[in-house]
Image (cartoon, rainbow, N blue to C red):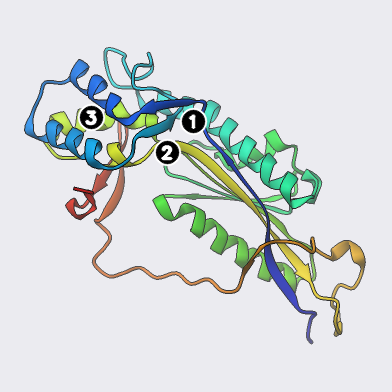
Amino acid sequence: MSMKLATLKVTGIGVAYPSSLVPADELDNLAYAHFNRSPALDKTLAINHCSGIKTLSVVAPFDSPFLNQPTAPSITEISDLFLVEGLALATSAARSAIAEAGISADEITHVVASTCTNSSNPGYDLLLARELGLRPTVEKILLHGVGCSGGLAGLRLASSLCHTAVWRERPANVLVAATEINSSLARNGLECVDRDQEVRVGLALFADAASALILSLEYGSGEVLDGAAADADRKGPEKGIFEVINAIHMVVPGTESILRFDISSQGLNFLFSPSFAPC
């Protein structure tokens, strides 16, 4: 048994940013409004100043009521904010990717979504599919805990799903989405700095955004062997600047503690190795 040749093409890309763009050094105002000066807090803010990042796109500005409550936002409040603002960003990015791919929502076959800043159940992959009006039979997968590599992990998984579709002689248009709402964690991160007297550089590096892409199967028009799909409606979009050739995954031994995302009763907290500090 054999099958027709197929390629994996990125046929659409979309991004979405919050409307609020704030100077990064305004983190000082939030920090000193709620916490006393200390070596750890001063060092964290010094790193923020010399990171080279001038502005941040955020859904929760540093002077917002959300971050300036008497106590840090609870994990429930953080989750609720993501499921409104994060979902809206993901939906916008996904719609842009679908439009650029030149397909309809009905042609999406899979959804792969990643995030570290939400742990709700059902996950935002299901909520995103609902917002986009996708078919209920669309296969949905949520990735959590992969951090900065979430987009690449989603693309790698999407590639595997496409390869499976080839063997099943089926079409595939996989929506991959990555969404993070890091601004919701700023107050909690500062509280950890104050309480534990540990420098937290994540506060200086991350903001809010969503990105999405469509990975499509493009079947070749050459010889079709036993059982391969030959009808035109199984032929993916014949476009796409980028082609996925191969993907591998490897964990470098001894690196597990370099980047962490701990969950506490107050929320989610970045933990980095000092080697991540930009200055």
Where does the image place residue 185, in percent across and percent down from the top left?
Answer: 34, 31
**The quarter of the displayed image where residue 60 is located:** top left
**The quarter of the displayed image where residue 229 is located:** bottom right
The residue nearer to you, when weighing 247 against 44, is: 44
Q: Alpha carbon of mark 1 to alpha carbon of mark 3: how far?
A: 20 Å
Residue 67, placed above or below residue 88: above
The earlier-in-sequence mark between 2 and 3 is 2
Label 3 CA crowd tier, 10 Å (few <14, some 14–19, many 20+): many
Label ID, residue 190? 3
Where does the image place residue 98, in percent across and percent down from the top left?
Answer: 72, 46
Residue placed farthest to the left in the image?
39
The kind of residue on which mark 1 rests is Phe
The residue nearer to you, when weighing 279 against 138, is: 279
Residue placed farthest to the bottom in the image?
1
Where does the image place residue 140, in percent across and percent down from the top left?
Answer: 63, 50
Residue 19, placed above or below residue 15: above
The residue at 43%/29% (across/down) is 58
The residue nearer to you, when weighing 198 against 92, is: 92
The earlier-in-sequence mark between 1 and 3 is 1
Q: Is residue 127 visible?
A: no
Image quarter (top left, top right, bottom left or bottom right) of the N terminus = bottom right
The kind of residue on which mark 2 rests is Thr
Q: Secondary structure at mark 1?
A: helix
Left or right of 36? Residue 52 is: right
Q: Which residue is mark 2?
A: 117
The earlier-in-sequence mark between 2 and 1 is 1
Q: Are marks 2 and 3 in contact (CB under 8 Å)?
A: no
